[in-house]
Image: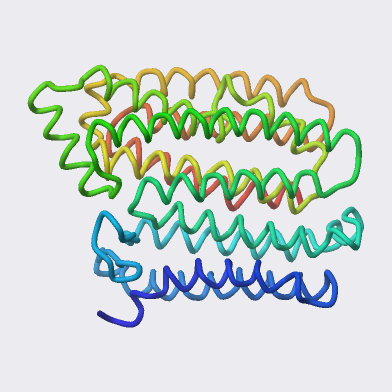
Amino acid sequence: MPFIYNFPFFSIFICMISGIVTPLLKNGKWAYRLSLFASGAGFVLSGTLLGRIGPNNESFSFMMGHFPAPWGNELSVGPLEAVLATTVCLVMLMALLGGSRDIFEDVLPEKQKLYFIMMDEILAALLALTYTNDIFTAYVFIEISTIAACAIVMAKDSSDTMVATMRYLIMSLLGSGLVLIGIVLLYCITGHLLFPNLQLRVLDLVSTGQYTMPLTVVVGLIVMGLGIKSAMFPFHLWLPPAHGSATTASSSVLSGLVVKGYIILMIRLFYKVFTIEVIRELRVTNMIFLFGLAGMIIGSVGAIKEGHIKRMLAYSSVAQLGYVFMGIGLGTDIGIVAACFQILVHACTKPMLFS
């Protein structure tokens, strides 16, 4: 196995280790430097990997711990995953650099190291959601990103921040619960957790006409849970208060990266577990398209009516995410490509507006 195939694991591992080491550092400035190193290293590793596998459209699976299923865990890497991981690391690096002044002004000195720990864990979770080939591992990192995202919103010490964080936490836990129920039902139906094994079992069930209604419920629960966490209309009401009260770097990461991580996972599940043909057959895409269309309109109207600049940008994000969900809701390869392109564009541009 070429050494470069270890790079996805290394990029996640560096971020996790950075979060573990940070409490041992002297102060927040050293924690900031370590977070810069972690995101910079992730960018270099992901970019190098993209340069290697992108031109040849190469894909591979990396078995972690060298244990086969069901005990082992896998990372699945292709050109799309490499592009997304490179973008995530770059945006995190730029958010830390551009928002450093506000971080040290708004976050109390005793909380600064904790703040950068949460940033490291968010990056690790997003990379894991991009690469993982195991649905239970995906859920674990969903929870990690949820807790860390709430923490970076609450880092700014104010009453508005506390209220916004509690609203965000409640909605996120609701979304996580729905995803977990969907995963449990899927495991009961299929008996597998790895994406390839799940896909084979799902296709077998669909071809024989078994468990059609339970599969529809599973897909609906997972889509609704991830939709709540990614601010899909009408589950977007937590987003404007969270943006309006958070620091600049937190708003940039929350809008540009965190909500995208759940959409990326949704797209990967559609292709690697259920297949887009099954999703269309279950008619879940119709619901996603309607929610995306409504979000595009309602988010734009909310942005026009809003006077607070950061809340206005939050409503704008709801509208832009509506375009993403409309692309997914088309249920075609071209629609998914358009959604992925919109994810990349919005992830790169929206943090600059907050900065």
Q: Quadrant of the N terminus?
A: bottom left
- 291 lies left or right of 202: right
Q: Residue furthest bottom?
A: 3
The figure's colour scheme reads rainbow
Residue 20 horizontal/vertical position (percent): 65, 69
Q: Residue at x 24, y 31 (%)?
A: 189
Q: Residue at x 37, y 75 (%)?
A: 6
- In the foreground, 60 or 192: 192
Examine the image and state in which quarter residue 168 appears: top right
Q: Is residue 173 above or below residue 288?
A: below
- In the foreground, 221 or 346: 221
Q: Is residue 56 above or below residue 346?
A: below
Any part of residue 313 in sight:
yes
Q: Residue at x 67, y 63 (%)?
A: 94
Q: Is residue 310 above or below residue 52?
A: above
- 299 lies left or right of 152: left
